[in-house]
Image (cartoon, rainbow, N blue to C red):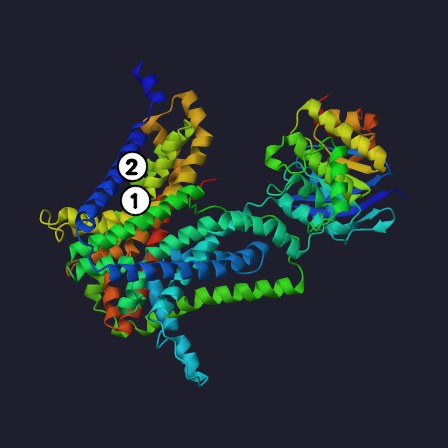
């Protein structure tokens, strides 16, 4: 019987996932080939320029990663050790904010605190110091990177602490371990196991940084590869230089991808951050004081830019852009965001199902490839893909007319890794629970999706869609590359205002963009996710 | 006065209000049985110091230990899982019983080897817990209990994950240890056969209370309706 044979083979969704993975992989290969022919052949352009850009990109990414981890480790320790202080949940939630906050908005918050006319400068003036903060250049890039990646590292590391079994802590106290013994015997091995993967992810994110380096980088001496590609494409119209830079970026990113694969770790978000086990260590006065100081500093570092954002945004309302242009930009932001989110979530869902299908059959290699293809966005930077699209389109397709499609595609690929980190564990857990029963009862295909998978997976799907939409909405790279005067969203509007030093107007745009992003996230999660099951 | 005196030991978990009274004589092996969720493991956690009692007292050998930290109580607990740190070798895991910071002298290492010898794991020093079977892992944990030299040993369903034959073997190992070191043993189990095999005394716990305690045969043969319901006889 045909039906029986079908239940042994792959469902249409799995086939779609495999097809999409093949298409993504093929596109990546095509882009690489295009870059190689356009940028690799002949005499290389400006070797010393390439070297300088590469050197700075590497240097700032390394420093950013080290500083972010230097802050994230003590903060995670303190959050794990103190499971019940007031405001803990708020602080942990706050660590998720940089994930949904558009980068450019966060940058504005950083500028409002550390910039030439920011809070820090005001404090320096008030106490009569000669010193003034110099934000633009390496310093600004580092502060902004730490602002975004310290909380991300906390979110990635905290689940590892939460996964330490309750018995280990009971054992530690039963054996009479002191705080330093707990650190040496339990925590150091955990950090040694977890930190390489987290460090690599943070390093890659800082290496392929765009918005932060574009807005806070100071001229040719503080330029990253991603920004250099953008400038070559949009200002110098030098496709050849752009392709050479993109090739360099692609090779570095492939190296990073290989390293992540070797470490064999996925980036997993949305795991339990609640610490329910009881801890017996860290009860001394010194440990309490240390944790209090770490948590207070961390909270201050994360909260002050947010407060500045809100205050300056409210104060800047009188000099905000005209309501018509704001409304228009907001509408474009929402449309592009939702478009990117829907594309990313649909691709992500079928990829996750295909990967689960491969895992369930023990096809490890295929599962790894599917996982890696979906995470292309982590390794192939937006500008590399953008350069590929420019090369492929050059002389054939009018990019002006298809700008929206370009932005949506690019931002969807960028959001895909985050979608997968939410969907993959959820799909795996649902399959674990229902696969055998569904096979026994013969529930499959569309019926299975409607009756079994949608009710159990709709919350993670909603979270993925909300996350992807907000990431797509706040992305500056895609819109900067493809946007034009008729397609200006809030991100691009804000970037223009920052560039023209219209800081009051920028402040109000940033506040509007932040509120819109948070509201968008909230609405999608509620509407699509429905009410809590059980 | 009994060796272990538990009086009015109070604790609350979710909706269950617990209050335990129990006396155990020195050298006894007492099984603690009862329905799941009755508070058996909570009782051990209170005696071990992992949970803080809301009231009442635990007195062991005439000393009130109610407010002592776990390491300073004359008890050691063997859990069902995670008795070993997965990243430490067998020798290091056992050595933790001598020095919680693993600063071990040559004499300490010899003591570790002797303890491993006693549980039948001679030469296992350098293996990692992941390379051992479930029974071997619990043997390593027992070797550490030997080195800790605490007069009271508590088993919190320590062998529940093992098969019947292996469970008997582990219980026999513990009974040998008890005779040699003159221990007092409290063991939570959900198998009445384990109680009949290893324990001369049994306490039956239901809904946060000790329903009855006494000679194992008497408790298992009790006409008490809660016990009959639990045993299904």
Q: Is residue A92 something one can see in this rendering? A: yes
The part of the image, by quadrant, that contains residue A334 is: bottom left
Q: Chain of mark 2?
A: A
Q: Is residue A527 something one can see in this rendering? A: no
Nearest to the observer: residue A517 or residue B37: A517
Q: What is the residue that sits farthest to the left in this orientation?
A: A395
The part of the image, by quadrant, that contains residue A145 is: bottom left
Examine the rendered structure and indicate whether residue A503 appears above or below residue B19. below
Residue B165 location (% of width, % of height): 70, 22
Mark toward the start of the polypeptide (1 vs 2): 2
Label 1: how many residues lie within 10 Å, few (<14), some (14-19) or many (20+)? many
Q: Is residue B77 left or right of residue A328?
A: right
Q: Chain of mark 1?
A: A
Q: For the residue labelled by badge 2, is the local secondary structure a helix, a strand or a loop? A: helix
Q: What is the residue that sits farthest to the bottom in this orientation?
A: A128
Mark 1 — residue?
A344
Nearest to the observer: residue A447 or residue B52: B52
Mark 2 — residue?
A21
């Amino acid at each position: 019987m045909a039906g029986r044979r079908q239940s042994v083979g792959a469902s249409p969704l799995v086939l779609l996932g495999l097809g999409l993975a093949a298409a993504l992989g093929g596109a990546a290969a095509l882009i690489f080939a295009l870059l190689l022919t356009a940028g690799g052949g002949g005499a290389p352009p400006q070797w010393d320029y390439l070297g300088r850009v590469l050197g700075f990109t590497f240097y700032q990414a390394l420093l950013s990663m080290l500083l972010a981890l230097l802050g994230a480790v003590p903060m995670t320790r303190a959050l794990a050790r103190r499971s019940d202080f007031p405001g803990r949940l708020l602080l942990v939630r706050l660590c998720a904010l940089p994930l949904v906050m558009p980068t450019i908005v966060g940058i504005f918050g950083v500028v409002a605190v550390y910039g030439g006319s920011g809070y820090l400068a005001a404090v320096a003036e008030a106490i009569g110091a000669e010193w003034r903060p110099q934000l633009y250049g390496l310093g600004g890039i580092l502060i902004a990177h730490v602002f975004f990646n310290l909380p991300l590292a906390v979110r990635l590391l905290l689940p590892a602490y939460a996964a330490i079994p309750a018995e280990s802590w009971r054992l530690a106290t039963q054996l009479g371990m002191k705080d330093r013994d707990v650190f040496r015997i339990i925590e150091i091995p955990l950090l040694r196991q977890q930190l390489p993967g987290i460090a690599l992810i943070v390093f890659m994110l800082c290496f392929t940084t765009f918005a932060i380096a574009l807005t806070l980088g100071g001229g040719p001496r503080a330029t990253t590869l991603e920004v250099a590609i953008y400038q070559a494409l949009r200002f110098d119209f030098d496709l050849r230089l752009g392709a050479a830079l993109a090739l360099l970026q692609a090779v570095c990113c492939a190296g990073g991808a290989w390293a992540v694969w070797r470490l064999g770790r996925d980036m997993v978000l949305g795991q339990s951050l609640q610490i329910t086990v009881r801890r017996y260590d860290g009860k001394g006065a010194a440990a309490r004081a240390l944790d209090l100081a770490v948590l207070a500093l961390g909270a201050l570092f994360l909260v002050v830019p947010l407060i500045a954002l809100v205050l300056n945004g409210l104060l800047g309302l009188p000099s905000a852009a005209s309501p018509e242009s704001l409304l228009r930009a907001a509408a474009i932001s929402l449309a592009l965001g939702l478009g990117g989110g829907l594309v990313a979530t649909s691709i992500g869902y079928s990829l996750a199902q295909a990967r689960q299908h491969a895992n369930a059959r023990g096809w490890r290699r295929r599962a790894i490839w599917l996982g890696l293809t979906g995470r292309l966005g982590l390794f192939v930077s937006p500008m590399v893909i953008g350069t590929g699209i420019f090369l492929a389109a050059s002389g054939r397709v009018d990019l002006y007319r298809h700008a929206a499609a370009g932005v949506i595609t690019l931002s969807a690929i960028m959001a895909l890794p985050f979608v997968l980190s939410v969907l993959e564990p959820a799909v795996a857990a649902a399959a674990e629970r229902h696969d055998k029963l569904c096979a026994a009862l013969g529930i499959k295909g569309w019926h299975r999706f409607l009756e079994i998978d949608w009710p159990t997976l709709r919350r993670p799907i909603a979270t993925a869609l909300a996350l992807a939409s907000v990431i797509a909405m706040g992305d500056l790279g895609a819109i900067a590359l493809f946007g034009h005067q008729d397609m200006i969203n809030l991100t691009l509007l804000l970037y223009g205002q920052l560039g023209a030093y219209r800081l009051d107007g920028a402040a109000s745009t940033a506040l509007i963009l932040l509120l819109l992003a948070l509201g968008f996230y909230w609405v999608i999660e509620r509407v699509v996710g429905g009410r809590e099951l059980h | 006065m009994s060796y272990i005196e538990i009086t009015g030991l109070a604790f609350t978990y979710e909706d269950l209000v617990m209050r335990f009274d129990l006396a155990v004589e020195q050298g006894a092996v007492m099984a603690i049985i009862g329905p799941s969720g009755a508070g058996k493991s909570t009782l051990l956690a209170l005696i071990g110091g992992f949970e803080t009692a809301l009231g009442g007292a635990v007195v062991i050998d005439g000393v009130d230990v109610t407010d002592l930290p776990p390491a300073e109580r004359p008890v050691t607990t063997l859990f069902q899982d995670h008795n070993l740190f997965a990243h430490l070798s067998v020798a290091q895991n056992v050595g933790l019983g001598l020095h919680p910071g693993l600063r071990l002298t040559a004499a300490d290492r010899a003591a570790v080897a002797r303890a491993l010898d006693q549980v039948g794991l001679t030469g296992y020093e350098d293996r990692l817990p992941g390379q051992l079977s479930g029974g071997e892992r619990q043997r390593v944990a027992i070797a550490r209990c030997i080195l800790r030299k605490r007069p009271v040993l508590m088993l919190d369903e320590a062998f529940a994950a093992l098969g019947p034959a292996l469970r008997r073997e582990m219980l026999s190992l513990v009974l040998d240890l008890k005779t040699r070191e003159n221990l007092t043993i409290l063991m939570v189990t959900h198998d009445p056969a384990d109680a009949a095999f290893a324990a001369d005394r049994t306490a039956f716990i239901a809904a946060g209370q000790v329903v009855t305690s006494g000679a194992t045969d008497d408790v298992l043969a009790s006409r008490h309706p809660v016990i009959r319901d639990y045993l299904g006889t």
